[in-house]
Amino acid sequence: MNKTVSNAEAAIADIPNGAVLGIGGFGLCGIPENSIAALVHKGVKDLTCISNNAGVDNFGIGLLLKTRQVKKMIASYVGENAEFEKQLLSGELDVELIPQGTLATRCLAAGYGMPAIFTPAGIGTEVAEGKETRKFMIDGVDKEFLMEYAFQIDFALVKAWKGDTHGNLVFRGTARNFNPLMAMAGKTTIAEVEELVPAGTLDPNYIHTPGIYVH
């Protein structure tokens, strides 16, 4: 049951070119910076990155953008990264912007094994172009909903405050926003922790992500 590895390089060793990555964090909080640094060092390319944001120029996903390792970025907020803006405007980077709630729920759907969700977010906007919509009766009124598919994430990279050797994780503060969702969504989930403790140390009542989600 011991799921620990020796370092970040060993943890990400199986991530190939062209992989779809789900990367946790909210703003600059809870970003798996050691895993990202290992990916930069490894030089994997043509990555699709799904994250709440695109980091900043010299931190987080911004490091992967700087080295041209990201082919496509799927995010809900990208406003503080000049390198991202440069690559977007030049056509180097494929970008899909989606509502933040939709991003979160598509992660949850992947974790729950659901193929798709229906959401009112994006109806009547560019977000809905080319996508299936359906009407559902809500409070006696037919309302239109947009169908969005669950993410297919090859590897999820998350960062926790504490974790044990079985992979149980506890997040702190704002880092809890997207990290647990990404951990659920990944076909393979890699967690880095600030403090690693023996199995049985963490109070089961306060574990945010059970070790069954962490590989």
Image (tube, rainbow, N blue to C red):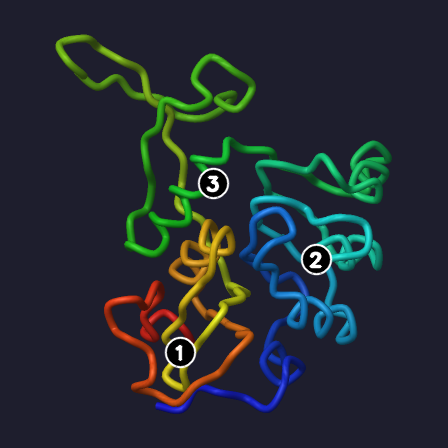
**Amino acid type, callout 1:** Gly
Between 130 and 2, which is closer to the camera in this rendering? 2
Between 147 and 175, which is closer to the camera in this rendering? 175
Q: Which residue is mark 1?
A: 167
CA gap, disc 1 and disc 2? 23 Å
Query: Image quarter for residue 93?
Result: top right
Q: Which residue is mark 3?
A: 103
In x, y percent, where is residue 160?
49, 67
> Residues at badges 2 and 3 in contact (C-beta under 8 Å)?
no
- Direction top: furthest residue: 141
Is 84 placed left or right of 189 in the picture? right
Residue at x 36% of width, y 75% of height: 168
Q: Which residue is mark 2?
A: 60
Task: First in sequence, mark 1 or 2: give its number.
Answer: 2
Looking at the figure, which quarter contains the N terminus? bottom left
Numbered disc in front, either 2 or 3: 2
